[in-house]
Amino acid sequence: MADLEQLTKMVTELRDVEALNQLMARYCHLVDARRWKDLAALFTEDATCDYGFFGSFKGRDEIMSKFFHPLDQAVSFMAHMVHNPLVEVQGDSASGSWYLTAQTTLEPIKQAVWVMGAYQNRFKRVGGSWKITAVNFTFWYYSRYEQGWAKEKIWEIPR
């Protein structure tokens, strides 16, 4: 049987893994709800984000102003679903990967698209709470709903 120190370590790690899974779920919910102020609070001030063909951004302010805020005009619907988590915690730092499946409606053309890819993110514990320090998203496909990913893999926004 594990001693108290081992059990404490295991419980702490399990709590951290769950907290990071909750952080990613919160990220998705806030993006879909366009709650930008609440979303910004999930990032460290010096966070970086690489969203593939949508661009790379440095610092929380640039991430919000140049990537998220423009989504208000670019899309009318988003439903992000993250799954298959792999999370590693090392003290006050962590990394994790999640698959993403998302349905999105592009504006102004009213085009529904399928999105699939993977997040490879890094995190840091700040003041007792986990924050996102880096988002790296790799697109596996981005295709029109009618065509689906088997017939059409597109990497640019349809116009």
Image (spheres, helix red, strand yellow):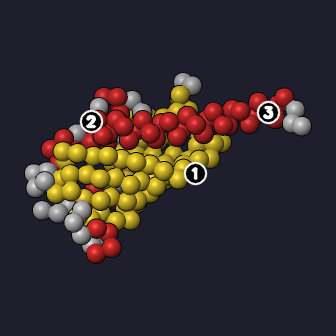
Amino acid type of disc 2?
Arg
Residue in the image at 87% along x and 32% along y: 3
Quadrant containing the C terminus in the rendered view: bottom left
Image quarter of residue 44: top left
Q: Amino acid at mark 3?
A: Leu
Residue nearer the viewer, 144 or 66: 144
Q: Which mark is residue 7?
A: 3
Residue 62 visible (yes or no): no
* Identity of the residue drawn at 13% across and 53% down: 110
Q: Are marks 3 and 2 in contact (CB under 8 Å)?
A: no
Which residue matches tag 1? 86
Task: In the rendered view, tell whether residue 140 sits above or below residue 28.
Answer: below
Q: Which residue is mark 2?
A: 34
In percent of width and height, residue 152 lies at 27, 73
Tag 1: amino acid? Leu
Position of residue 71 relative to residue 111, above or below, is: above
Of the two numbered discs 3 and 1 on the same chain, state the one appearing first in sequence: 3
Compare marks 3 and 2 and give the one earlier in the sequence: 3
115 and 97: which is toward the camera: 115
